[in-house]
C-alpha cells in the first residue's frame, strides 16, 4: 500500500484502496463506503477546519475572509464555534471515519491571540475522537504542545506550491531553507511526518518526493484542489 492520499472528491473507492491512509471530505462519503474502505485496510481521516468557516453567516465569524478559498475566519475561542466543531467531529466519527484531519491551524501570523484557544479546541476534538488518529496540518505556532495532542503532522506545500489557478513551482531557495529548518525541528517530535506538495509535472513531483524523504516525511503530490489520486 502507498502511505497516504488527500482527495477532496467523492467515490473512487478502488483507487483509494491503494493507500494506507486517506484524507476525505467528511460529508462526501457514506457509512457503507467508509466501512468498505476500512475492510480493505484503509484508515479514513475526515476533514475538519478549526479556524475557518465556509458555512452561512454565524456569530463566531470574523469579517475577514480567506482570499484563496473564501471561508470566513472565526473567533476560535467562541464557545459556539467550539461546540460547532466538536459536533462536526462527533458526526464524522459516528459515520465511521478512523480519525480526523485538522486543517487551518496557521494563526501565528494572523490571529496569534487565538493560539491558546486553538490548542484548547484541538484538545476538545481529541476527546471526541478518542484513541483514533489525529493528523494536524502545519500548526507550527502550536509546537511543541501540539505534538502531545496529535499522532501526525503534515507539512503542506513543503517543497512545491500552486502559484495561481494554472501554475505550479518549487519554492524559492530562501523559502526552502526556512521550511528545512522547520522540518528539522519536526524530526525531534514523537509524531508521524507527512508532506503534501502541488505539482503539474513529473520533474516537480519527483523533486518534492525526494526532498520530503530527506527530512523523514512521506509525501503525496496532487493538484490545487486535491482532485488527483
Image: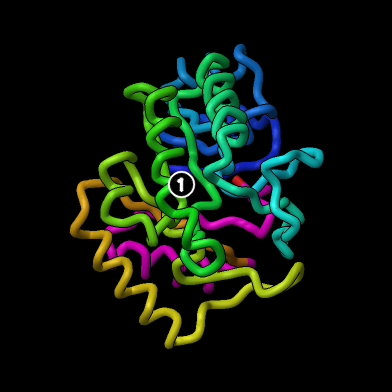
Mark 1 lies on a secondary structure that is helix
Q: Which residue is mark 1?
A: 118
Q: Nearer the viewer, residue 99 or 145?
A: 145
Q: Is residue 46 left or right of residue 180?
A: right
- Relative to 84, say whether 184 is above or below: below
Magenta segment boundaries in residue numbering: 200-228
> Residue at image x 65%, y 32%?
12
- Residue 64 vertical placement versus 122 (above, below): below
Residue 179, above or below 4: below
Residue visible at 38% across and 73% down in the picture: 179
Residue 170 point in image, percent of width and height: 53, 77
In the rendered image, is residue 95 in sight?
yes
| Residue 215 is a magenta residue | yes
Give percent across and percent down for residue 207: 45, 72
The x and y percentages for residue 184 are 25, 68
**Residue shown at 51% from the left, 66% from the top:** 205
Q: Is residue 1 left or right of residue 169?
A: left
Count neighbours of disc 1 (C-alpha within 10 A) and say few if under 14, some if 14 to 19, many if 20 or more: many
Asked if residue 49 lies left or right of residue 58, the reply is left
Q: For the C terminus, give its image quadrant.
A: top right
State whether residue 3 appears in this view.
Answer: no
- Quarter occupied by the N terminus: top left
Q: Quadrant of residue 88?
A: top right
Q: Quadrant of residue 173?
A: bottom left
On the image, the x and y values in percent for residue 194 come to 38, 52
Amino acid at each position: 500500500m502507498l502511505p497516504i492520499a488527500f482527495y477532496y472528491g467523492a467515490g473512487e473507492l478502488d483507487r483509494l484502496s491503494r493507500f494506507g491512509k486517506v484524507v476525505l471530505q467528511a460529508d462526501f462519503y457514506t457509512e457503507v463506503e467508509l466501512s468498505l474502505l476500512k475492510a480493505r485496510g484503509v484508515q479514513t481521516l475526515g476533514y475538519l477546519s478549526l479556524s475557518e468557516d465556509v458555512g452561512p453567516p454565524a456569530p463566531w465569524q470574523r469579517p475577514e475572509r480567506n482570499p484563496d478559498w473564501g471561508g470566513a475566519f472565526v473567533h476560535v475561542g467562541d464557545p459556539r464555534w467550539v461546540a460547532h466543531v466538536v459536533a462536526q467531529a462527533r458526526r464524522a466519527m459516528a459515520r465511521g471515519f478512523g480519525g480526523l484531519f485538522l486543517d487551518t491551524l496557521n494563526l501565528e501570523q494572523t490571529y496569534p491571540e487565538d493560539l491558546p484557544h486553538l490548542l484548547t479546541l484541538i484538545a476538545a476534538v481529541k476527546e471526541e475522537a478518542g484513541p483514533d488518529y489525529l493528523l494536524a496540518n502545519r500548526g507550527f505556532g502550536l509546537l511543541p504542545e501540539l505534538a502531545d495532542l496529535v499522532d501526525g503532522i503534515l507539512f503542506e506545500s513543503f517543497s512545491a506550491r500552486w502559484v495561481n489557478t494554472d501554475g505550479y513551482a518549487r519554492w524559492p531557495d530562501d523559502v526552502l531553507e526556512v521550511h528545512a529548518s522547520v522540518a528539522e525541528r519536526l524530526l525531534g517530535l514523537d509524531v508521524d511526518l507527512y508532506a503534501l506538495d502541488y505539482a503539474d509535472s513529473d520533474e516537480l513531483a519527483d523533486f518534492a518526493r525526494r526532498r520530503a524523504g530527506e527530512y523523514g516525511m512521506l509525501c503525496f503530490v496532487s493538484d490545487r484542489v486535491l482532485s488527483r489520486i
